[in-house]
């Protein structure tokens, strides 16, 4: 990218119109306190739009003051992005894409037309209607070569159609943005070339299997006993005899047979010897079981006997 410098001749001052001041405040309000610098690009764009399509130095200062930014920081943004024109432009500012896809499709011939009809780059025609500039990729490679004129894209250009376009703009005649050939948007030149068979969409081929279900009457079914409940077998009755069912009938939730089986399998409780059931009296006078008494107390009891 070539060095971008401010124009030699500058206006004495710049100030946003009241409407644009209100608009700028709305843009600044989108960002949290302390982050007002985030609005620098939209404010510079609005200043350029107000000043006839190019950004003068006083406008850069005005934006810096409004955002509380150092002037050099705003100047860095304005000189970095090629979307900001730093010199006067014509009423119709023509930006010709000079990146590889467009050059391979004849963008150099479009630049020759600009040099012949308008003059050198950054030169405004004598009537003030046209100026032009070679720029980097404008993002419409599929429709190369192309040019951006103010806010519109004009694609699939050739020297003849491009020169006619410039003449129409200069003389105020209506023009049609977009592809300048028989092409739907970014589709194939001349129109679609695939998926043209109408049977793909009318259902006669694709999706025809549905016709068998949409048009054929539903077959009648003979009565069947499949849905009728059948009588349970003894095993099924026993399996369905749950504790909840027994409780609902007022019976014990646990079967008598289960209770008997549990009782027969339970281990017998250990019997206690008679002497272990006797109690001894400790010095404090509290009764203790022999098993709980200190060994000295048990020995004294045996001596007493």
Image: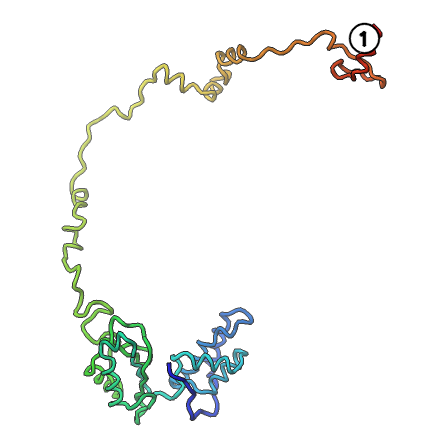
Assign a secondary structure to mark 1. helix
According to the image, label 1 marks what residue?
Answer: 302
- In percent of width and height, residue 183 lies at 20, 70
- In percent of width and height, residue 288 lies at 78, 16
Q: Of 176 and 270, which appears nearest the observer?
A: 270
In the figure, is residue 129 to the left or right of 44?
Answer: left
Q: Residues within 10 Å of mark 1 (few under 14, many from 20)?
A: few
Q: Residue furthest top?
A: 305
Q: Of 218 and 142, which appears nearest the observer?
A: 142
Identify the residue at image location x=50%, y=18%.
253
Identify the residue at image location x=53%, y=69%.
32
Up the image or down, 12 lies above or below 70; here it is: below
Up the image or down, 262 lies above or below 134; here it is: above
- In percent of width and height, residue 246 lies at 47, 18
Q: Quadrant of the N terminus?
A: bottom left
In the figure, is residue 263 to the left or right of 126?
Answer: right
- In percent of width and height, residue 196 lies at 15, 60
């Amino acid at each position: 990218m070539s060095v971008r410098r401010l124009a030699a001749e500058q206006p004495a001052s710049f100030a946003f119109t009241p409407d644009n001041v209100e608009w700028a405040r709305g843009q600044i309000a989108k960002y949290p306190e302390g982050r007002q610098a985030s609005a620098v690009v939209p404010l510079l764009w609005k200043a350029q739009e107000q000043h006839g399509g190019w950004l003068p130095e006083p406008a850069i200062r005005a934006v810096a003051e409004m955002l509380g930014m150092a002037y050099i920081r705003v100047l860095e943004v304005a000189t970095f992005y090629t979307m900001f024109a730093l010199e006067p432009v014509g009423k119709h500012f023509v930006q010709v894409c000079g990146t590889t896809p467009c050059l391979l499709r004849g963008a150099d011939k479009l630049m020759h037309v600009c040099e012949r009809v308008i003059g050198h780059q950054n030169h405004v025609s004598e009537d003030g209607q046209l100026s032009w500039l070679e720029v980097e990729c404008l993002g419409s490679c599929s429709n190369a070569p192309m040019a951006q004129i103010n806010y519109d894209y004009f694609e699939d250009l050739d020297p003849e159609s491009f020169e006619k376009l410039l003449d129409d703009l200069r003389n105020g005649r209506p023009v049609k943005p977009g592809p300048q050939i028989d092409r739907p948007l970014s589709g194939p030149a001349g129109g679609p070339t695939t998926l043209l068979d109408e049977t793909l969409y009318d259902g006669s081929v694709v999706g025809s299997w549905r016709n068998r279900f949409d048009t054929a009457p539903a077959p009648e079914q003979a009565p069947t006993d499949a849905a009728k409940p059948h009588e349970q077998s003894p095993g099924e009755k026993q399996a369905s005899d749950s504790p909840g069912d027994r409780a609902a009938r007022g019976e014990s939730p646990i079967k008598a047979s289960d209770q008997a089986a549990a009782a027969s399998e339970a281990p017998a409780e250990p019997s206690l010897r008679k002497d272990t059931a006797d109690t001894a009296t400790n010095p404090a006078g509290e009764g203790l079981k022999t098993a709980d008494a200190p060994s000295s107390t048990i020995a004294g009891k045996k001596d007493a006997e």
